[in-house]
Every structure is written in structure tokens, then in C-alpha cells.
Image (spheres, rainbow, N blue to C red):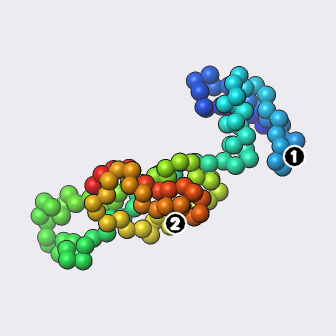
Amino acid sequence: MEEMICITCPMGCHLSIQRLSASEIAITGNRCAQGEAYAREELLSPKRVVTTTCSIAVPKANAGPKAGDRNQASLYRPRRVPVRTKTAFPKERVPELLSILAGIEVALPVRRGQILVADALGSGVDVIATRTM
């Protein structure tokens, strides 16, 4: 018997889950249908919204500050853009997604909500920018 607390609504129901087989579970303790749906997804196919940052591509013509160059523009130029998955992404594939996002360079300008990676890893989930830069 497993126990968890539902986090989908303010009631915070204490759920008791009994595994009947690898793909079937019995849930008690929920006071609404959301609790049952939450427990099923969390135990059978967990998902998470993934947030991280990606590098900003430096234009070739302006490859960045030279040694000793400390002007204001180079000191405050953003180096990373915050990104997230548009919807929840399969939890077991999060490390694979993060390794792909670590190698991406985003060209500026970028708008908040702009899709940077469509259908990430064939999951149907897009990766979007969360800030206009």
C-alpha cells in the first residue's frame, strides 16, 4: 500500500494506493475525481514541466568583448535565455531533454512564448522561451 497527498486542489486529500498489477491501481481517500486522475498519472506515467536556460548565440561580426574590454554593453549583455516546456514532459526522459537543451544556442531577438524546439524528442511537447530578449 502506497500513500500520497494530492496537490491538484486545496483540499490536499491523503490518497491510499494499492497496486493490482503493473498497469492497474486502486485509489481511495480522494474527495474528487482530480485526486484519482492525479494518482494514476503520477504512478503510471509521471510528467513534469521542465525549466532551464539556453545559451544565446553571439553574432559572428561581434564575437564578444576582447581582453581588457569592459564597456557597459558587454558587461550587461545577457548570456542565457530562460526556457520551459509548454506542457508537462515525460519524467523518465527529462535528463535526455536537458542534455539536448544544453547544446542549443538561441539567436536574438526572441519573444516570450516563441517555440525554440518543436516536438521535443518526438513527445509532442514544445520548448518555449519564457522571456522576451
- Quadrant in the picture for the N terminus: top right
Q: Nearer the viewer, residue 54 or 3?
A: 54
User: Is any part of residue 14 visible from this angle?
Assistant: no
Q: Amino acid at mark 2?
A: Ser
Q: Residue at x 82, y 48 (%)?
A: 23
When the figure is inspected, residue 75 is found, relative to residue 36, above or below; the finding is below
User: Is any part of residue 44 visible from this angle?
Assistant: yes
Residue 70 occupies quadrant? bottom left
Mark nearest the camera among 1 and 2 is 1
Residue 96 occupies quadrant? bottom right
Q: Residue furthest right?
A: 20
Q: Position of residue 67 (x, y in %)?
A: 17, 75
Which residue in the protein does label 2 denote? 99
Residue 80 occupies quadrant? bottom left
Q: How many C-alpha atoms fall within 10 Å of the one at disc 2: few (<14), some, or many (≥20)?
A: few
Q: Nearer the viewer, residue 75 or 106?
A: 106
Q: Residue at x 35, y 50 (%)?
A: 112
Q: Position of residue 76 (x, y in %)?
A: 20, 57
- Quadrant in the picture for the C terminus: bottom left
Q: How many C-alpha atoms fall within 10 Å of the one at disc 1: few (<14), some, or many (≥20)?
A: few
When the figure is inspected, residue 81 is found, relative to residue 19, above or below; the finding is below
Which residue in the protein does label 1 denote? 21
Q: Position of residue 90 (x, y in %)?
A: 62, 53
Q: Dot 2 lies on which element?
A: helix
Q: Residue furthest left?
A: 71
